């Protein structure tokens, strides 16, 4: 449990989960935007640079004079790319004046969405995370839960939960902050990145050897003139009936990327959808398709697992899946995954007529349930 008395309890915000009762609403496959192959990598039109700068200056001038509910909320956000990590020449970071949600945003699950939602209530929302942790700690590489080229689409789907604003991502090289004390980390947020405030979960740890907790974050943010919003964890409704293998002390029943990975590992796609707040989308490189056959009433496509850009569910046959390819309408399909390949079977043969000579393109699969 958190400690810190009335100070920390004053900052804990009760989360409103009524929208979790309709996980598919607005986020399911049928209502999601069909993404062009090229749009996985497209960057939306940004507001003019001088407008962004003025908005940041306004935020700095008002942050200390207004209550959190009165803080100006920027209505337009641009996409965050890796080259935005460096400070622009004029000295402002791309997150200056914004509110950053702190965490490890691998799965982009409903807990992460809640952090972004809370951030959007008081400012321009950003997800701040670290890259390169696996290399620093020597961890075995593993597939991401969300394909890198698909993250923008997922964040766009959060817009209804974030005041019709799409959260942006901002990443910091972990090696550059690994040895920072909790105070040095908060100082970096304030003086270097110049954010107006932070949002974190009640179990958030930060600083060298995870020395800082949520209570410390609140205290340090107050010291550096920033707002800190600590929210309660989004709990897994199925926690009593789920046995998470390899469960460690961090797992206290909250929704987590660990639970998403475990649900994928056992092929429980209904559970995966509940945790993510959307259907899991697997992304493949079209160029790597090995086999494409068409009969009078069936179309079959096979591809090696090496073409997958994110984590697939366990081996098996999945029904009620949907295939997304370019501007084509979603195509119902069955997916069979074995030890080396992924196979798709469709009743519509039109999808087999794509041009495989156009280089690297992407094909998306959204999963239904595992067949017994």
Image: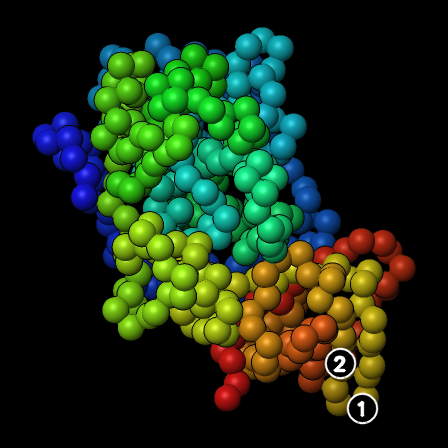
Tell me the SS state at disc 1.
loop
Q: Is residue 2 above or below residue 84?
A: below
Q: Which residue carries the number 1 mark?
A: 296
- Residue 202 in view here: yes
Image label count: 2
Instruction: Say whether residue 257 is left or right of residue 239.
Output: right
User: Residue 27's x, y, as percent?
Assistant: 46, 59
Tell me the SS state at disc 2.
strand
Instruction: Say whether residue 142 is left or right of residue 28.
Output: right
Q: Which residue is at 48% across, 61% downward?
A: 261
Q: In this view, does 305 lie above or below 315?
A: above
Report if the CB atoms under discs 2 and 1 are less than 8 Å apart. no
Instruction: Say whether residue 90 is left or right of residue 302.
Output: left
Q: Which residue is at 59% across, 82% downward?
A: 317
Q: Which residue is at 83% across, 71% downward?
A: 290
Its colouring scheme is rainbow
- Using the numbered discs, state the Cα–Cα distance from disc 2 to disc 1 in whole angstroms: 11 Å
Q: In this view, does 146 lie above or below 24?
A: above
Give the residue at the far left of this rendering: 6
User: Residue 40's x, y, as percent?
Assistant: 66, 49
Q: Which residue carries the number 2 mark?
A: 300
- For the residue pair 193 and 21, the one nearer the viewer reads as 193
Instruction: Say whether residue 320 is left or right of residue 297.
Output: left
- Badge 1: residue crowd in 10 Å (few <14, some 14–19, many ≥20): few
């Amino acid at each position: 449990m958190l400690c810190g008395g009335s100070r920390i309890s004053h900052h804990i915000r009760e989360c409103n989960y009524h929208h979790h009762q309709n996980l598919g609403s607005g986020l399911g496959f049928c209502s999601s935007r069909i993404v062009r192959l090229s749009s996985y990598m497209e960057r939306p039109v940004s507001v003019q640079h001088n407008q962004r700068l003025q908005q940041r200056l306004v935020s700095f001038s008002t942050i200390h004079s207004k209550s959190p509910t009165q803080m100006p909320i920027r209505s337009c956000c641009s996409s965050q790319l890796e080259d935005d990590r460096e400070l622009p020449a004029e000295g402002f970071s791309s997150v200056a004046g914004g509110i950053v949600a702190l965490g490890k945003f691998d799965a982009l699950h409903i807990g992460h969405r809640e952090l972004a939602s809370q951030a959007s209530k008081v400012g321009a929302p950003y997800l701040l995370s670290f890259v390169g942790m696996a290399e620093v700690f020597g961890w075995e590489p593993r597939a991401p839960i969300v394909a890198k080229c698909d993250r923008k689409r997922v964040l766009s789907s959060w817009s209804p939960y974030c005041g019709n604003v799409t959260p942006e991502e901002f990443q910091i090289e972990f090696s550059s902050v690994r040895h920072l004390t909790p105070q040095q980390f908060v100082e970096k947020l304030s003086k270097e990145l110049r954010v107006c405030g932070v949002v974190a979960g009640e179990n958030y740890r930060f600083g060298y050897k995870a020395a800082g907790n949520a209570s410390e974050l609140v205290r340090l943010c107050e010291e550096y003139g920033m707002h800190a919003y600590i929210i309660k964890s989004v709990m897994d409704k199925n926690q009593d009936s789920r046995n998470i293998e390899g469960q460690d002390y961090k797992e206290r029943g909250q929704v987590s990327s660990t639970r998403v990975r475990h649900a994928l590992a056992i092929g429980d796609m209904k559970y995966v959808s509940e945790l993510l707040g959307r259907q899991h989308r697997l992304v493949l490189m079209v160029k790597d398709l090995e086999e494409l056959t068409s009969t009078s009433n069936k179309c079959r496509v096979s591809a090696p697992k090496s073409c997958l850009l994110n984590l697939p569910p366990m081996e098996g046959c999945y029904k009620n899946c949907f295939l997304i390819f370019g501007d084509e309408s979603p195509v119902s399909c069955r997916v069979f995954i074995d030890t080396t390949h992924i196979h798709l079977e469709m009743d519509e043969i039109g999808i087999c007529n794509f041009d495989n000579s156009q280089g690297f393109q992407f094909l998306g699969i959204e999963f239904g349930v595992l067949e017994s």
